[in-house]
Amino acid sequence: MTTYFESLKLPISPKISTLSEEDQALIFNYLNNLTETEKICYKIAYQHLGSSFDILRSNGYIDWLKKKSS
């Protein structure tokens, strides 16, 4: 699954490879559906937070999951 992330052209934490395939698929779908503005925001957050960035705890991802499950 992690090879699919390369197609997104976004920085991806190596921690993603330790997650379940289900979580990886959800993260991929989330990132794949970001608007250009959201991608810029994601890149900035990733760069500024560095190794402490956790997509599973990010507000955007959490909101996306809530909308998806509704």
Image (tube, rainbow, N blue to C red):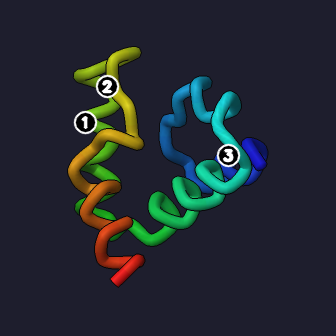
Residue 63 lies in quadrant: bottom left
SS at badge 2:
helix
Q: Nearer the viewer, residue 1 or 5?
A: 1
Kindly give the residue lying farthest to the bottom in the view shown.
Answer: 70
Q: Determine crowd level at label 2: few under 14, some 14-19, many 20+ residues with C-alpha closer than 10 A.
A: few
* Quarter of the image with the C terminus in it: bottom left
Mark earlier in primary sequence (3, 1)? 3
Q: What residue is pinned by disc 3?
A: 6
Q: CA distance from mark 2 to mark 3?
A: 17 Å
Pinpoint residue 10: horizontal percent, then vertical percent.
Answer: 50, 44
The answer to which image quadrant residue 55 occupies is: top left
Q: Which residue is mark 2?
A: 47
For image coordinates 69% across by 32% down, the residue present is 17
Pinpoint residue 22: horizontal percent, then vertical percent: 67, 56
The Cα–Cα distance between marks 2 and 1, rounded to whole angstroms, is: 5 Å
Disc 2 and disc 1 in contact, CB within 8 angstroms: yes
Q: Residues within 10 Å of mark 1 (few under 14, many from 20)?
A: few
On residue 44, the disc is 1
